[in-house]
Amino acid sequence: MTSEQPLLEVDNLKVDFHTPTGIVRAVRGLSFTLGRERLGIVGESGSGKSMTGRAILDLIPHPGVVSADRMRFRGQDLTAMDKGARRKLRGRHISMVMQDPKFSLNPVETVGSQIAEAYRIHRKAGVREARERSLAMLEQVQIREPARVYDLYPHEVSGGMGQRVMIAMMLIAEPEVLIADEPTSALDVTVQLQILKILDDLVTERGMGLIFISHDLHLVQSFCDRVIVMYGGKVMETLPAAELADPAARSRRHPYTLGLLECLPDLDHPRAKLATLNRDPAWLA
């Protein structure tokens, strides 16, 4: 990060769901800043990673309630904006790549028309310009024969290609911040590396801020600049990604972070039995 104004500032973010049986606290007082960098958010399923991204984009459904002492995008107070203003910001300035393209793409429209629609809405462009920009964007995310793929329906593309289409759709309006929610979890290793390279190149070339949500600690360690470790909706620690599994920094790690690392198989140091993660109720106090 540099000394310039952060792209995103979040202070004491909370997401609560008011249910008949009580309040479910999905995010508990999360605070962070995002510059032109790759920020990883890791933790188990249910730790609040995806809820954090959705809260930033004002996508928490009823009965969810979002509150924050401060949530700013490039100095603009998100908490003070009405629904219309937040909607204009979403997609044009802050975009989110969802986990599985099968549930995010419209099955009855071609992938090209969906990318072009995003460009027309956010850039106020005509049909011809939107098609040309969509074809260029498909090529930028390394899809071969973009003109052919443009006319395909979501069920006609592979999982890896569908994820690239989603990335193209979210990036075509040239947002300053991209939230990627488990963008490689359903992909094989070779396709994962291709998707990560695309994201890395775009962050470097465009100077974007990237929030990379994942449960894969090894992946986050190798790809991100900083890491937020979450458990039960609460931040356990924030650290440079390079220190995540550094033996020299082990004594400074939170017990939950160490527990997650111990649960991972290590081919260089095989064990007969993987460790079991012990959770301390005091972590959420």
Image: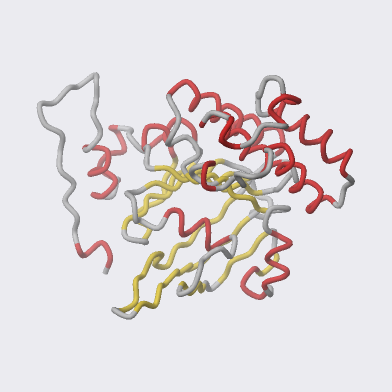
Q: Would residue 258 be found to the left or right of residue 235 on screen? A: left
Q: Where is residue 258 in the image (x, y as percent from the top left)?
A: 25, 43
Question: Residue drawn at (72%, 70%), measured in percent from left and top?
Answer: 84
Residue 282 occupies quadrant? bottom left
The answer to whether residue 1 is visible is no
Quarter placement of the N terminus = top right
Q: Would residue 56 be found to the left or right of residue 237 on screen? A: right
Q: Would residue 249 be found to the left or right of residue 162 on screen? A: left
Compared to 158, does 233 lie above or below? below
Q: Position of residue 133 (x, y in %)?
A: 81, 35
Q: Position of residue 148 (x, y in %)?
A: 72, 24
Residue 174 occupies quadrant? top right
Residue 36 occupies quadrant? top right
Question: Residue drawn at (37%, 42%), measured in percent from left and top?
Answer: 215
Q: Identify which residue, 1 or 174, lies in the foreground.
A: 174
Compared to 51, does 142 lie above or below? above
